[in-house]
């Protein structure tokens, strides 16, 4: 049931979505078909699924490491934005240069930018016992406002017809396509390699074992000599770095620049991906594809069924709700005794 419940949650989301949109006057059946089925049966949409899934998988991998250590990083969206900002800073500094080294330098800056932003809640958590849930979440809004300031101020493209955006990245600053004329870029295989690396680290190394022990049994971890503070630092820096890398890849891939529209909620959606994948790196790849289907399908439903743009967020919210609800039934069962129902372990 632990691995079957995500499939049950998806089915319940589709059924509930069909009923809700039918009740408010839309074609509920075709709405659900457009969102969940059409992206899978139309081959021309598969590249879009990979492009959408890659950043979700990267961010969710980092979040899963923290969640396993009982470190709740809710601000991956801010780390995603700061990684893109740091990488774009390198892009603007090297805009008139050429060389193979520019894109790796941007990627490194993205990782450092995301990790540095995550280091703030890590420091506050370890030194002052401040909840990382609140600090990481609030820092997201600081990062977004900093982005707005840059693209409307010092980084604004002077040749951009007064639009709030940076210069377009040069040829050496964008992710190369995997095939001529394809939307599939280098970020997709990198996301898969990162999933394999996370699987190895979490399942086959002492560091991964320390993360799991600190998360599940803090007292046993202290007895075994594992430092909870170090694990907190490692978990937040890893999640921030992966979110920052995802932000840079998104800026250097589909966007090709920074604009006010860059924050698209991937950092929050990745939380759903992590839990849908059961905090397993391989499961996260599956979860990333499922949520990518809702993004691509939501765009299809807007043009075919005339659903509002908010429909995508609604389906994602319902998916998280049903996932949490089915998890209750994995750990608990209803016991009917003497005419009364009660929850029993």
Image: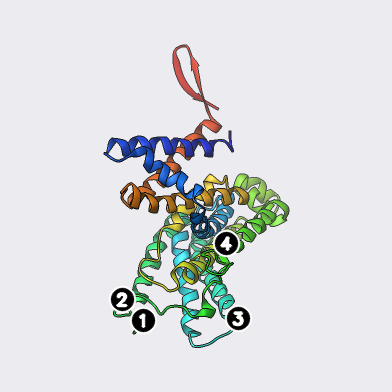
- Residue that badge 1 annotates: 157
- Residue that badge 2 annotates: 163
Q: CA distance from mark 2 to mark 3?
A: 30 Å
- Residue that badge 4 annotates: 188
Residue 329 is tagged as none
Question: In what element is the residue under mark 1?
Answer: loop
Q: CA distance from mark 1 to mark 4?
A: 29 Å
* Total numbered labels: 4
Q: Marks 3 and 1: CB-CB under 8 Å?
A: no
Task: Please tell me how crowded label 4 is: few (under 14), some (14-19), or many (20+) other residues with Cα within 10 Å.
Answer: many
- Image quadrant holding the N terminus, namely top right
Spot the residue most to the top: 338
Q: CA distance from mark 3 to mark 1?
A: 24 Å
Task: Please tell me how crowded label 2 is: few (under 14), some (14-19), or many (20+) other residues with Cα within 10 Å.
Answer: some
Question: In what element is the residue under mark 3?
Answer: loop
The relative height of residue 218 versus residue 227 in the rendered view (above or below) is above
Spot the residue most to the left: 25
Question: In what element is the residue under mark 2?
Answer: loop
Q: CA distance from mark 2 to mark 4?
A: 30 Å
Q: CA distance from mark 3 to mark 4?
A: 19 Å
Describe residue 60's horizontal placement relative to residue 162 as left or right: right
Q: Percent from the top left, x then y, of residue 309?
A: 33, 53
Q: Nearer the viewer, mark 1 or mark 4?
A: 4
Q: Quadrant of residue 196?
A: bottom right
- Earlier-in-chain disc, 2 versus 1: 1
Residue 100 is tagged as 3
Q: Percent from the top left, x then y, of residue 51?
A: 51, 60
Q: Is residue 254 visible?
A: yes
- Image quadrant holding the C terminus, namely top right
- Earlier-in-chain disc, 3 versus 4: 3
Describe residue 210's horizontal placement relative to residue 51 as left or right: right
């Amino acid at each position: 049931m632990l691995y079957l419940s995500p499939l049950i949650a998806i089915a319940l989301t589709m059924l509930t979505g069909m009923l809700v949109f039918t009740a408010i006057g839309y074609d509920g059946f075709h709405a659900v078909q457009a969102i969940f089925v059409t992206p899978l049966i139309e081959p021309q949409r598969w590249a879009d699924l990979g492009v959408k899934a890659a950043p979700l998988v990267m961010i969710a991998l980092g979040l899963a490491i923290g969640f396993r250590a009982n470190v709740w990083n809710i601000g991956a969206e801010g780390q995603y934005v700061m990684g893109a900002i740091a990488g774009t800073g390198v892009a603007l500094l090297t805009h008139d240069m050429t060389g193979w080294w520019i894109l790796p330098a941007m990627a490194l800056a993205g990782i450092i930018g995301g990790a540095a932003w995550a280091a703030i809640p890590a420091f506050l958590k370890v030194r002052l016992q401040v909840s990382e849930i609140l600090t990481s979440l609030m820092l997201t809004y600081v990062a977004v406002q900093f982005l707005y300031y840059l693209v409307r101020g010092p980084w604004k493209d002077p040749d951009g017809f007064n639009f709030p955006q940076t210069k377009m990245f040069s040829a050496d600053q964008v992710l190369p396509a995997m095939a001529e004329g394809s939307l599939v870029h280098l970020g997709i295989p990198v996301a898969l390699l990162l999933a394999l690396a996370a699987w190895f680290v979490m399942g086959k190394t002492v560091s991964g074992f320390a993360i799991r022990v600190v998360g599940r049994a803090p007292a046993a971890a202290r007895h075994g000599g594992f430092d909870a503070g170090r694990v907190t630092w490692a978990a937040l820096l890893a999640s921030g770095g992966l979110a920052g890398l995802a932000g840079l890849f998104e800026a250097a891939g589909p966007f090709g620049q920074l604009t006010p529209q860059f924050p698209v909620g991937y950092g929050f959606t990745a939380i759903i991906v992590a839990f849908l994948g059961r905090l397993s790196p391989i499961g996260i790849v599956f979860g990333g594809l499922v949520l990518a289907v809702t993004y691509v399908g939501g765009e299809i439903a807007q043009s075919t069924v005339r659903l509002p743009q908010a429909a995508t967020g609604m389906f994602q919210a319902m998916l998280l709700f049903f996932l949490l609800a089915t998890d209750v039934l994995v750990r608990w069962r209803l016991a009917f005794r003497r005419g009364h129902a009660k929850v029993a372990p």
